[in-house]
Amino acid sequence: MLGFLQAASGFKIWRSSFSTETPTMVKDGTTSFKERNPFITFVLGGPGSGKGTQCQKIVETFGFKHLSAGELLRREIESNSEHWSQMLNTIKEGRIVPSEVTVRLIQQEMESSDNNKFLIDGFPRTEENRIAFEQLLGLEPNVVLFFDCPEEEMVKRVLNRNQGRVDDNIDTVKKRLKVFEILNLPVIDYYSKRGKLCKINAVGTEDEIFEKVRPIFSACAGK
Ligand SMILES: Nc1ncnc2c1ncn2[C@@H]1O[C@H](COP(=O)(O)OP(=O)(O)O)[C@@H](O)[C@H]1O
Ligand SMILES: O=c1ccn([C@@H]2O[C@H](COP(=O)(O)OP(=O)(O)O)[C@@H](O)[C@H]2O)c(=O)[nH]1
Ligand SMILES: [Mg+2]
């Protein structure tokens, strides 16, 4: 049933070339990232639900480091890194890039940051993403935000976004909504059962929505 979501051409070869690498968390003589005891927030929601917009506001008010998984992947593509064309095709088709790639990029950004409070925006997109992150870093999120938005509102926002993205067109958006429902909702459900989910109704003005976000962080930041 999920075949159409995962069967990118060359996907298996691409994937196996990553799986031979052994991720090294603790280099000789250095402490592991986990020992920094970072505060981690995953920010989830469908395409156009307002994740990036609200992350900006959280950064301004609470001083988090914002890591957008999609932005990190787009940056990799722009820098012509290895596998850039498979990544571009995957994004154009609204499918999910292998966890090894995304987790490595997120891990690098976290480890090189002076900030210890992270907003990880648009990740994990699948249960496989979630498990890869938790196993490789040995960490779980402290909080998971879920911006709950009706599909027609998400479509309208994405089609008006105007950032020149290859995936902001009606065909790709329809595929992304399907991928969100099939692969991302189980992650949201998982964190709900773990008592970590903060579900926010994402309809309203940006400021109205931020007023629902603010108390979640005020409690721990004293603001
Ligand atoms: N509450 C809102 N009401 C209307 N438009 C919004 C709202 N929040 C964000 N937008 C707009 O919708 C588009 C998608 O928002 P974005 O933050 O990029 O969403 P996501 O990161 O979840 O895809 C952007 O053009 C943004 O300016
Ligand atoms: O962990 C991730 C995050 C993003 N993507 C890809 O990057 C695209 C854009 O993601 P982004 O979060 O930027 O989109 P948004 O939801 O903000 O519109 C997604 O559709 C996926 O194809 C991915 O494969 N893995
Ligand atoms: Mg975004």
Image: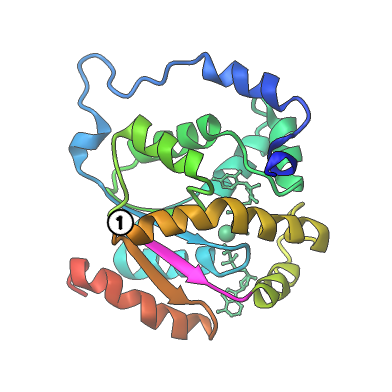
- Residue situated in front as seen by the camera: 71 or 133: 133
For the point 51% across and 64% down, which residue is it? Answer: 51
Q: Is residue 205 left or right of residue 135?
A: right
Task: Answer whether residue 155 is visible to the viewer in this image.
Answer: yes
Packing grade of label 1 (10 A; few <14, some 14-19, many >=20) is: few
Residue 185 screen position, x and y as percent? 52, 58
Q: Is residue 149 covered in magenta?
A: yes
Ligand 1 shows up in the quarter that is bottom right
Task: Answer whether residue 168 is visible to the viewer in this image.
Answer: no
For the point 62% across and 24% down, which residue is it? Answer: 15
Q: Is residue 97 left or right of residue 107?
A: right
Residue 215 vs 114, above or below: the answer is below
- Residue situated in front as seen by the camera: 195 or 59: 195
Specify the amino acid type for callout 1. Answer: Arg
Residue 164 vs 22, above or below: the answer is below
Secondary structure beneath dot 1 equals loop
Residue 79 vs 159, above or below: the answer is above
- Residue situated in front as seen by the camera: 69 or 145: 145
Residue 200 screen position, x and y as percent? 43, 75
- Indicate the quadrant where residue 25 lies: top left
Q: Quarter of the image for the N terminus: give it.
A: top right
For the point 75% across and 32% down, which residue is it? Answer: 85
Residue 10 screen position, x and y as percent? 75, 25
Residue 117 vs 103, above or below: the answer is below
**Secondary structure mostly taken by the magenta-highlighted segment of the chain:** strand
Total marks shown come to 1
Stretch of the chain drawn in magenta:
143-150
For the point 77% across and 52% down, which residue is it? Answer: 166
Residue 172 screen position, x and y as percent? 77, 55
Q: Is residue 147 covered in magenta?
A: yes
